Amino acid sequence: MAVFRIDRFGPSEAAANAVRERIAALLKRRPGGRRQTNPRLIRAIEIALVAGIGVLLPIIMYQGLGPVPKPPTAPAPTPLATPSAEIGPINPFRTANAPAAPAAPADVGENLSETTLNLSLHGTWIDAKGGTAIIKTPDEKQGRFAVGDTITSGVTLDRVERDHVVIIRNGVREALRLIDRDSAAGASAAAPGGAAPAAFAGDGMAAIGHFIVAMPETDEVGGMRLVLQPADDVDRFEALGLVPGDRLVAVDNQPIDRDIAAGLEAIAMTQGRKSVTLSIERDGVVMPIVIAMPNETVAMPND
């Protein structure tokens, strides 16, 4: 331990300087004493900081001021292949607002066996929903069935075509064809003297003479009704006192209502008669019109 001797009775400048030097030397030798940092190390650290800031600053500016990235989206589903349109059989009696009949698939018609069930097909009507059929069931009742409806136990209507329907019977497809189609067509062609008997048309329509066709049509509430349309000659049709679109409500005073099957059968029963009285509804008014057959002259509406 260092011992300082100070003459308090005789201090001098030299003694004071000596004390200062000793204290400074002791402070330099202390472990916690201040040490001088290398200037090169400080310069290297400063350069590294400047370089890091130079790299990060453009990235931060791009993230903050650059365009907003679009969120990831799921890939668009692959569109299903749409079957190409086919040209089906042409209906010469179809009106402008009636749907065209779709082409018949290759697996129906002659390739299907005729059903052995006690069913009778009296008419078909093809529309955008697949169509409907007028079928007599084993209980001797006629009804209108749409595609998918159950006709009888274990039998559903699968498809409606112009001259037949396809039914599914316990998982097996079978055909049900219009009754007396061939014989009716032959009788119509062989009518003597240009007579015009009433007959079923191939797609659920019924013809009276050469100028009148009764065809099913869907009304505003989804029900079916029979309307009258010209077969080919509009002038002759209108000369009978009819207007295209007249609703047929009775044949020879036999009401039809919404029973399409009964209406078609009533028209078929007019074959061979000298005259037919058609009760039509037009603009909410029902009027009878007498059609003379086979010359198809017309009597004025009865008062």
Image (cartoon, helix red, strand yellow):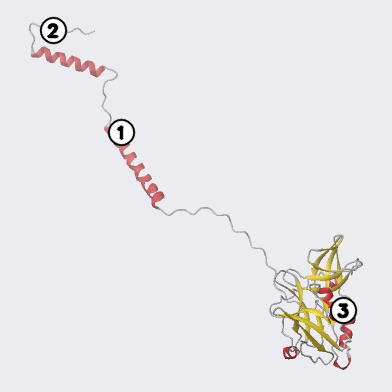
**What residue type is disc 1 on?**
Leu
| Residue in the image at 18% along x and 14% along y | 22
Q: Report the Cα–Cα distance between label 2 and label 3.
A: 149 Å
Which circle's residue, 2 or 3, is located before the other in the chain? 2
Residue carrying label 3 = 181
Within the image, what quadrant is residue 234 found in? bottom right
* Image quarter (top left, top right, bottom left or bottom right) of the N terminus: top left
| Residue in the image at 80% along x and 63% along y | 149
Q: Position of residue 133 (x, y in %)?
A: 81, 71
Helix, strand or loop for disc 3: helix
Which circle's residue, 1 or 2, is located before the other in the chain? 2
Residue situated in front as seen by the camera: 15 or 260? 260
Which circle's residue, 3 or 1, is located before the other in the chain? 1
Residue carrying label 2 = 6
Q: Position of residue 257 (x, y in %)?
A: 79, 74
Residue situated in front as seen by the camera: 55 or 267? 267
Q: Report the Cα–Cα distance between label 1 and label 2.
A: 45 Å
